């Protein structure tokens, strides 16, 4: 193959000598693949000349059938599109109107809450708040807001004194007293205390006329309870709900109040204005009983809105749209408030409701015909067009059959493309995994015949996923192409650079080498990749990256083992901190093999129920009484006996088996705690949770299941998470811990002080307990080891958290912790981890720990 590079043989060092070394000719695998592609694409025989007429008839009949089916399908497709367009427009109308109504309801609720929480509120303050909220712009259709106060007969004079000093709208009140009325069977008045108006008209004449007509109704001496508003006010006060009604249906001038001026009658008749009346109670909530509502009622807020500005934007969703806005209270029929648009004859009306506020209803009539030709017309056009194409195809068929030579040439081109696609990466143009494996196999075979040895450099980009996540896959592809170019330029022409997939590359090096020579090559590759890449994305950016390289050399039984060992060395480089290289040693493979064997043994141990729990008491340092226990996992190995966590926990936590083992620990610990509770000893139990468990979706379900099956109160279960795990993904961890806290489970940070969690992060987690790492307790033996420990204890106290010291083994440590105010502790000074039966003797005994010694009649007192 001409694509295969010609290798050159170096004598000692890959970059000091360049003696040519011929690369083998294309392998039989490559040639066989090309031959199969050629047979698939080039071996088809064209139709014989004598059969073309019969074939033409078949094509004609098939074309007729296909044309008919296509025409019907197109007709159905266009009809479906128009139905979908109507549905989309309805959703758009619902979204637009629903958003406006939600905003207006929010504004009305805001004014209601403002009045309820600020009894001293003035008209000027109310106007200032509404101005800051920018009500006309942010809340469509808002016109006016008033607060009508429920004034008893005894409080009328006090109310007049306040309104004389701060009259609504700045209009002085009349001298005459309002007429008394009955609300909920009690005499009193419903008088305007606050008012703020944003008038709609821009014509000064109409504005003055409106103000002169509306002002008496908003004065402090207009009694709403003695007007047409009485029914709404009474119902709103009794039910505690907000009610909506048309203003024009309510404003009926009582005796002594001005009628609508003739100049305004025609203008007001066309205004679709509605009012939302909401009761105001003392306190922050709505009383639950009618009696309490009657006692705590202080008044009502009235919010007036223009329905045209609410419905107007929805009319822009399409031509031929008409809307009817209505509102209904529970158990009542909807009341029409406003209309917008021109109704269409023969168009069905769709009723839209809003789950957020079921009282609002919109009747929408929308023309489904749309624009453009009808579906039937388009279907016929497709039918005749398809028939024309069929006839044209039959006429061209004879010419196509005679173009055998052109078809064969096309087959050859396609064969070459297939060969290239089968052996080369489409993104970078480098040899792909198939071709790399073939070349490794050939080089290994030649090395067996006393040829030059082979070295494989397995290259994986560090943190490449972050490039795709932050800059997009287009930038990631550009980076991969740039890396391919850099690697190709950094090696000899005789070396092979390939891409195995994703961000994994490989360099095949044939020639004499030493460890120093391999290190030089690796350093050259790393140096080439460290130089920033300039990517031509939407904006030109400079991107720095690094790589981890694994190197494997020597003979193997098969090429796959050589690539496998290089891959193993590469993962070792990842563990060592990335941006480095590692030469494969046999102990690496043995370590991976041992880890795999241990994972298999752990799976078998879980299946055979070889895991069990031991418990270590957690003691109140002031009283010496055990307040709880920590559940610890042990492995009863059939040959090695009891295996401690240091020998298997790290491997267990890196496998998915930790999720099921963690569920077992939760179930068993909660079950044992329930048994102790039944004996009359309500102690808590703590369970450790690993990183894979914490970020798994089922952890909360497992905790809930364990608590329910054991019938254990959630407050007796503590979930312990190490500080290091908290910092891996703080946001995801906070969500999971919040869900556990919502169940009532307590959260403890284990090994606190070793993970460098910031105080800001610590406050975001729903933490109840800080468990101070044993290393800080051990440092109490030196005079310099107490400062940080004391600071951790004081930090817990300042945050209101329970502090537990781990690893207490000596009496002086216990005394110092008690002196500093540490709440609880655990360690060998009190007890080592013991089976449930022996721990039961401690927590059910009558004695307590004093200076680390158990004082009781229990058999453990002598230990």
Image (tube, rainbow, N blue to C red):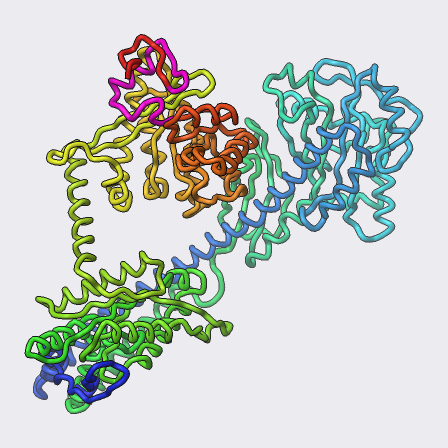
Q: Name which residue lies at 13% across and 69% down.
A: 559
In this rendering, the answer to whether 483 lies above or below 734 is below
In the depicted view, which residue is nearer to us: 254 or 153? 153
Q: Quadrant of the C terminus?
A: top left
**Is there any visible trace of residue 355 in the rendered image?**
no
In the depicted view, which residue is nearer to us: 238 or 734? 734
Name the side, left or right, on which 779 lies relative to 225: left
Res. 292 image quadrant: top right
Q: Quadrant of the N terminus?
A: bottom left
Name the side, left or right, on which 749 lies relative to 597: right
Q: Name which residue lies at 39% across and 73% down.
A: 478
Residue 347 horizontal/vertical position (percent): 50, 51
In this rendering, the answer to whether 719 lies above or below 96 is above
Res. 405 image quadrant: bottom left
Q: Name which residue lies at 26% across and 73% down.
A: 516
* Residue 384 belongs to the span the image colors magenta: no
The segment highlighted magenta reads 826-852
* Residue 851 belongs to the span the image colors magenta: yes
In the depicted view, which residue is nearer to us: 163 or 475? 475
Name the side, left or right, on which 447 lies relative to 144: left
Name the side, left or right, on which 842 lies relative to 542: left
Q: Name which residue lies at 17% across and 40% down.
A: 603
Residue 402 horizontal/vertical position (percent): 16, 90
- Residue found at the very far left of the displayed protein: 449
Residue 111 horizontal/vertical position (percent): 71, 36
In the depicted view, which residue is nearer to us: 608 or 491? 491
């Amino acid at each position: 193959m001409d694509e295969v590079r010609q290798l050159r043989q170096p004598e000692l060092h890959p970059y000091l000598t360049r003696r040519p070394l011929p690369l083998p000719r294309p392998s039989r695998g490559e040639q066989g693949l090309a031959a199969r592609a050629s047979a698939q694409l080039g071996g088809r025989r064209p139709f014989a000349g004598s059969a073309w007429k019969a074939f033409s008839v078949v094509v004609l009949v098939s074309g007729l059938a296909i044309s008919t089916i296509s025409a019907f399908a197109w007709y159905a497709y266009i009809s479906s599109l128009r139905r979908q367009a109507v549905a989309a427009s309805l959703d758009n109308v619902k979204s637009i109107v629903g958003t406006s109504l939600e905003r207006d309801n929010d504004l009305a609720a805001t004014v209601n809450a403002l009045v309820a929480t600020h009894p001293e509120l003035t008209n000027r303050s109310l106007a200032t708040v509404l101005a800051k909220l920018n009500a006309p712009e942010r809340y469509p259709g808002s016109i006016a807001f008033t607060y009508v106060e429920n004034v008893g007969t005894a409080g009328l004079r006090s109310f007049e004194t306040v309104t004389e000093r701060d009259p609504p709208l700045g209009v002085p009140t009349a001298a005459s007293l309002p007429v008394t009325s009955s609300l909920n069977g009690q005499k009193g008045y419903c008088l305007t205390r606050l008012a703020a108006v944003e008038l709609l008209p821009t014509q000064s004449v109409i504005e003055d006329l409106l103000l002169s007509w509306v002002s008496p109704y908003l004065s402090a001496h207009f009694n709403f309870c003695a007007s047409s508003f009485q029914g709404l006010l009474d119902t709103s006060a009794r039910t505690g709900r907000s009610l909506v009604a048309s203003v024009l249906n309510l404003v009926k001038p009582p005796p002594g109040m001005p009628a609508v001026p003739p100049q305004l009658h025609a203008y007001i008749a066309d205004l679709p204005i509605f009012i939302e009346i909401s009761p105001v109670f003392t306190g922050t909530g709505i009383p639950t009983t009618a009696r309490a509502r009657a006692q705590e009622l202080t008044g009502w807020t009235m919010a007036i809105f223009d329905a045209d500005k609410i419905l107007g934007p929805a009319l822009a969703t399409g031509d031929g749209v008409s809307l009817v806005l209505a509102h209904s209270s529970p158990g009542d029929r909807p009341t029409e408030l406003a209309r917008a648009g021109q109704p269409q004859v023969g168009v069905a009306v769709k009723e839209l409701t809003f789950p957020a506020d079921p009282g609002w209803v919109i009747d929408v009539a929308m023309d489904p015909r749309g624009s453009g030709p009808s579906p039937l017309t388009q279907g016929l056009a497709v039918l005749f067009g398809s028939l024309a194409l069929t006839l044209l195809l039959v006429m061209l068929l004879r010419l196509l059959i005679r173009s055998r030579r052109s078809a064969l040439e096309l087959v050859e081109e396609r064969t070459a493309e297939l060969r290239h696609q089968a052996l080369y990466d489409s993104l970078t143009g480098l040899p792909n995994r198939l071709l790399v494996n073939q070349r490794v196999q050939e080089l290994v075979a030649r090395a067996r015949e006393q040829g030059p040895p082979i070295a494989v450099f397995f290259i994986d980009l560090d943190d490449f996923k972050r490039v795709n996540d932050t800059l997009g896959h287009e930038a990631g592809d550009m980076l991969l192409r740039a890396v391919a170019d850099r690697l190709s330029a950094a090696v000899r022409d005789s070396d092979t650079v390939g891409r195995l997939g994703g961000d994994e590359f490989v360099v095949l090096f044939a020639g004499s080498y030493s460890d120093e020579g391999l290190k030089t090559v690796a350093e050259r590759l790393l140096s080439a990749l460290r130089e920033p890449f300039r990517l031509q994305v939407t904006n030109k950016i400079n991107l720095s990256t690094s790589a981890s390289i694994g190197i494997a050399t020597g003979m193997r039984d098969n090429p796959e083992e050589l690539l496998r060992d290089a891959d193993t060395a590469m993962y070792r480089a990842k563990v060592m901190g990335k941006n480095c290289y590692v030469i494969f040693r046999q102990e690496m493979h043995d370590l991976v093999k041992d880890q795999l064997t241990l994972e298999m043994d752990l799976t078998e141990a879980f299946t055979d129920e070889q895991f069990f729990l031991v418990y270590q008491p957690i003691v109140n340092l002031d009283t010496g009484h055990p307040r709880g226990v920590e559940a610890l996992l042990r492995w009863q190995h059939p040959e090695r006996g009891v295996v401690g966590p240091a020998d298997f926990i790290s491997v267990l936590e890196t496998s998915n088996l930790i999720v099921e083992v963690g569920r077992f620990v939760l179930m068993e610990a909660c079950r044992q705690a329930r048994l102790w509770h039944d004996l009359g000893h309500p102690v808590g139990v703590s369970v450790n949770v690993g990183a894979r468990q914490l970020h798994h979706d089922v952890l909360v379900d497992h905790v809930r299941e364990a608590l329910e099956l054991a019938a254990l109160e959630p407050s007796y279960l503590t979930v312990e998470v190490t500080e290091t795990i908290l910092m891996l993904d703080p946001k995801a961890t906070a969500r999971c811990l919040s869900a556990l806290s919502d169940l009532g489970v307590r959260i403890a940070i284990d090994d606190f002080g070793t993970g460098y969690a910031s105080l800001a992060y610590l406050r975001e987690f729903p933490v109840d307990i800080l468990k101070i790492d044993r290393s800080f307790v051990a440092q109490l033996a030196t005079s310099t080891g107490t400062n940080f420990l004391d600071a951790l204890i004081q930090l817990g106290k300042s945050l209101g958290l329970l502090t537990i010291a781990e690893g207490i083994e000596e009496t002086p440590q216990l005394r110092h912790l008690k002196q500093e105010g540490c709440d609880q502790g655990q360690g060998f000074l009190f007890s080592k981890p013991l089976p449930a039966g022996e721990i039961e003797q401690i927590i059910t005994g009558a004695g307590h720990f004093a200076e680390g010694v158990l004082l009781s009649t229990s058999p453990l007192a002598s230990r």
